[in-house]
Image (cartoon, coloured by chain):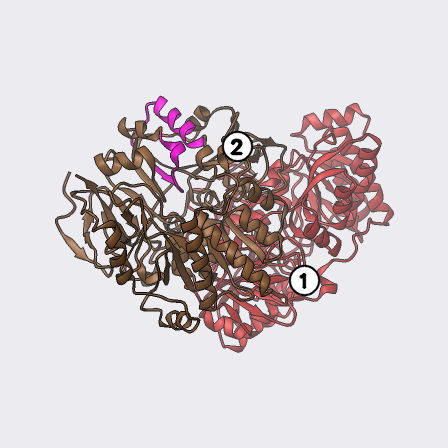
Chain colours: A red, B brown
Amino acid sequence: MEKSKEVLIETKMKNKLPEFIPGYGQVKPYNGPFATQPTTVKQGVNMTSSKPGDKKLLSSVREALEKVEMKDGMMISFHHHLRNGDHILNMVMDEIAEMGINDISICASSLTNAHEPLIHHIENGVVTGLHTSGLRGAIGKAQAERNILGKPVVFRTHGGRARAIEAGEIKIDVAFIAAPACDEMGNMNGAEGKSAFGAMGYPLVDAQFAEKVVAITDNLQPFPLHRVSIPMNLIDYVVTVDSIGDPDLIATGATRVTKNPTDLLIAKNAAQALIASGYIKDDFAFQAGSGGASLAVCKFLREYMEENEITGNFAAGGVTGFLVDLLEDGLFKALLDTQTFDAKAADSIRRNPNHIEISASMYANPHNKSCSAHQLDVMVLSATEIDESFNINSLTGSTGRIMGALGGAPDTAAGAKLTLVVAPTMRKRIPIVVEKVTNIVTPGDTVDILVTERGISVNPNRTDIQDKLDATGIETMSIRDLRKHVENFTGKPEQIEYSDDVVGVIEYRDGTVMDVIYKTM
Amino acid sequence: MEKSKEVLIETKMKNKLPEFIPGYGQVKPYNGPFATQPTTVKQGVNMTSSKPGDKKLLSSVREALEKVEMKDGMMISFHHHLRNGDHILNMVMDEIAEMGINDISICASSLTNAHEPLIHHIENGVVTGLHTSGLRGAIGKAQAERNILGKPVVFRTHGGRARAIEAGEIKIDVAFIAAPACDEMGNMNGAEGKSAFGAMGYPLVDAQFAEKVVAITDNLQPFPLHRVSIPMNLIDYVVTVDSIGDPDLIATGATRVTKNPTDLLIAKNAAQALIASGYIKDDFAFQAGSGGASLAVCKFLREYMEENEITGNFAAGGVTGFLVDLLEDGLFKALLDTQTFDAKAADSIRRNPNHIEISASMYANPHNKSCSAHQLDVMVLSATEIDESFNINSLTGSTGRIMGALGGAPDTAAGAKLTLVVAPTMRKRIPIVVEKVTNIVTPGDTVDILVTERGISVNPNRTDIQDKLDATGIETMSIRDLRKHVENFTGKPEQIEYSDDVVGVIEYRDGTVMDVIYKTM
């Protein structure tokens, strides 16, 4: 295979990217968060037809694969709302392998540890393409170290995936949708049934733009289903199975605020910085990751909001039970939810009309007419690395291993008026604040404040925020000084050695390339 | 202009159609309700982009027209959920005329008497194209007699309109949507506010496939609107006006069962025929027009259902307060609603989760993956004429004047297992049951029973139904005999004389041509 490093282009982010990547194509480098405009039309799938008496109900995944004429070379899509409890992807892929079909590309909204059996399908040539937001565990390790796919995984943000599908950059032949409630014609929702997971943000897009759409359900309801998130006019077949997912693993567990004293210190400092910045006021719009430190920020913000009788407008996510409490206690007026993170939140979306299901396109696609990410005042992110240019890495470890995800971080960082990163300065003596991140996921020009347990740094291009923090007496330091300070404890991290093989392409939400991941030596 | 009658093709319906119609194009003749398959992809509109801080809120229709760069030759769309109370179409068209823009084509879901001012815009060349389900009053008369457009009006069914828009046969440059509740980013619903009309079935399609979408509201709500029928990611601009419609004219009035003894007799006979046919049983799916006789059929059916403890599955429509009563009294489990006909039904859709809003595509588009019309057991239709082949005319009068609509009649007649027509045999000595209808709107091969005050006729291709009616002792007669019987009272209607100008094209729901309307002499 030809090498990709031969011609390198220097980007706005000062990283060097190959001009052309085998197995990916021409590279259009990132050029600023809103610099790249769409030049295409939305993709048009083939029109179909229906007749009275048509049946869609099938009794096995195998039958569905035969009906949709699954064949070598197809692109199929999945969504990860069932997270670690998902049965759908493995169920479908095992059957595809069984049928002797090869060269399948998978476009997943993300991949979790539940999907590790995929590694065999990759090694056996059943799967030869991966499009995802995240990759972890054995697959991430094997791809980073051995390029098992033989070409790069394409990583996209949640908004970028919706955009790429709408733009036809990803042409889905068959979308498989896990449907916690579904009728025999394919009307479905994610909020009802034993495997309820809540919002159906990702497949809301897939169902519109895939050639064929298969709903897989363990809860067949009488026609017509009354609560419809995805309507039957977009669905080809309905398959009933015993279980679409393991309910115990669907939820990431009760969302608990961290008890780790470092995380609590960071969260407290972060809340103070947010308050000082002036954005925490009536009708502010808020989003935070679901990590322990982010949730702890919510806890401290909540205290401030209650003391000062501040009511926010909406909170968005990735919605946890913690956000549900804020809604129910009147601290926010609405939740915008593209993916529900636990059972409490899934219950909320079913019964509370102020907990609103939105598509991934409405959440974060930069190339439509509005997205909620662009309506945010405050976004709180975490990071596995952050560098002197405020670039965030949330995908790869300092060893070069692929072990995280893009998620909605680049989307919301671009959209929010204030993007604050909470991170410890080091984990197990590995520095988090570094000179240069292993890979850029969220560009520093969309990140405003870093809060660590050893100091707070403000992006120099946000003098307005620096002034506000100065005015309230919050001490800050340059991120360079912070980095150097951290290096006193950790030492300078060793440089990883890479080969020339590109094993991952990190797309920015607009379809440009932010960075590439090389195979480790 | 070249004449259209020069080359005629004989159709399956035994009417002769021109091969080519100036101002319309090549004619693809109707070939049976499910014979014509789609051969195209769904149209793709241009992708756009949004940035944080983008504003959509405009203070006048004029400003919106400037923002969307309205210009000569554009196709714009409207919907008629506000019916006779609609202010939007006239408001927009007056402003377009004021700006000196010409040659506009209007794609309306239907036109009502409220839209008569349009006649001036047509006469002045502002409007040169009309796509609609119905046309009445002065415009219908002027087009039939004088061809004021200078080319045919294209008539489509509700399902056919959705299909044509999705297929790109109609390319909407700008869609104008009346929004009874809307936030500043364009999230909207039709169920809340002083001008609430209920379901937004038609613009649910327009918003997806129009290049630009303008929401016009008299009820601006805080962002984010909690009940979202059409999401902001599809909306370009939001215009606030004092009133989008006259609430007193939005509803067609309290839906009352007819007191006309002839209509009551027909309805009673129709209910008996339906019961005898065997389709009125647990879980049947039902739709009926909103005319007095159709409602009266519901009344008699209701009595039968209560006596026999029958619970239907869903009723669909065009939903009236009468259907709401059936839902609330437990006689049906759900209502599927693409257009809400009165204030009581609008109130129901707002508060009752079993009253379900559906798009016009999910309602009746034959070229998607399912529509509710194809799930019907029983459809009750009315007619202005019905002929010996059971063809129904609901658009033109026996004088050739355009005075009605296609609505969902051809869609539901094709979809329902049993289509029953209720009609008096004559109105003011003009026969309704005729040898040949003035124009075919709903083809006879999709119509099963005619019930009049003077007799019941069963389509000869439904021997199964004939047998059932015979078995229960219901007297029937051939429709030819019925027609002759009626002629004894009315005499043979005079033949209308037509010119060669085609002033209307009646498309079947699949995009073929069912019939054409010629200019009267």
Is residue B498 positioned above or below B377 on the image? above
* Snapshot quadrant of residue B419: bottom left
User: Where is residue B502 drawn, in percent x and y?
Assistant: 21, 43
Q: Nearer the viewer, residue A241 or B414?
A: B414
Would you say residue B96 sits in the magenta stretch? Answer: yes
The mark found on residue B395 in the picture is none
Q: How many other residues sit within 10 Å of disc 2, few (<14), some (14-19) or many (≥20)?
A: some
Tell me the quarter of the image containing the N terminus of chain B: top left
**Could you tell me which residue is drawn at 48 percent across and 24 percent down?**
B60
Residue B105 visible somewhere in the drawing = no
- Which range is magenta? B88-116
Secondary element under disc 2, as helix, strand or loop, is helix
Q: Amino acid at mark 2?
A: Pro
User: Where is residue B301 drawn, in percent x and y?
Assistant: 51, 59
- Chain for disc number 2: B
Residue B452 visible somewhere in the drawing = yes
B390 with respect to A139 (left or right): left
Question: How many badges with numbers are in the image?
Answer: 2
Which mark is in front, 1 or 2? 2
A379 with respect to B462 (left or right): right
Q: Which residue is mark 2?
A: B247
Q: Nearer the viewer, residue A195 or B308?
A: B308
Q: Amino acid at mark 1?
A: Gly
Q: Which residue is mark 1?
A: A193
- Chain for disc number 1: A
A406 with respect to A430 (left or right): left
Q: Nearer the viewer, residue B324 or B272?
A: B272
Tell me the quarter of the image containing the C terminus of chain B: top left
Secondary element under disc 1, as helix, strand or loop, is loop
